[in-house]
Amino acid sequence: MSWALAAVAVIAFGAGAASGVLIASRRRSRMLRIREGIAELAGGNLGHRIILPGDDDAARMAVEINALADAVQQEREASGAREEAQRKLLANISHDLRTPIASVAGYVDALQRGLGDDPERYLAIIAAKTE
């Protein structure tokens, strides 16, 4: 009888140890997936998401990391849009400044060459464009 009891105890201990190893292995595997996902995000792949089913700490951490990645990705897109708007604004301002300057330069050149029959009219146009 004692051999049977000892055998049951050994089997129970073995099953418990195996169960513990499996649980620890599953946790390590889930943490490895989180580390790999963070490495992807850190490498610039902001479209990467960590998918971990379940309701344990690892799954909750994955959800929070994904939310952070969403926020960073949205900010990067908004920043790109702001930079594009700023480039367009500077191009428009530059064009608006060059156009009257080119016009004034043309009238000054015409006056210096003695072209045109009414220099006073040219001077009035130059004065109007510089206001």
Image (cartoon, rainbow, N blue to C red):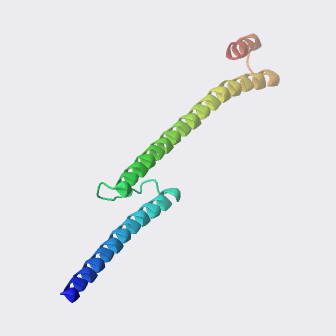
Residue 67 coordinates in the image, percent (x, y): 40, 46
Residue 45 coordinates in the image, percent (x, y): 47, 57
Examine the rendered structure and indicate whether residue 43 appears above or below residue 109: below
Name the residue at 41% across, 64% down: 33
| Number of callouts | 0
Examine the rendered structure and indicate whether residue 28 appears above or below residue 15: above
Left or right of 24 in this view: 122: right
Please tell me in which quadrant of the rendered image residue 36 appears: bottom left
Residue 77 coordinates in the image, percent (x, y): 47, 43
Examine the rendered structure and indicate whether residue 55 appears above or below residue 76: below
Name the residue at 62% across, 29% down: 93
In front here: 123 or 16? 16
In front here: 100 or 72? 72
Residue 2 coordinates in the image, percent (x, y): 22, 86
In front here: 70 or 80? 70
> Could you tell me if residue 44 is visible in this image?
no
> Could you tell me if residue 108 is visible in this image?
yes
Name the residue at 61% across, 33% down: 90
Which quadrant: the N terminus?
bottom left
Examine the rendered structure and indicate whether residue 95 appears above or below residue 111: below
Residue at the far left: name it.
1
In front here: 10 or 3? 3
Please tell me in which quadrant of the rendered image residue 7 appears: bottom left
Which quadrant: the C terminus?
top right
Name the residue at 45% across, 43% down: 71
Please tell me in which quadrant of the rendered image residue 100 appears: top right
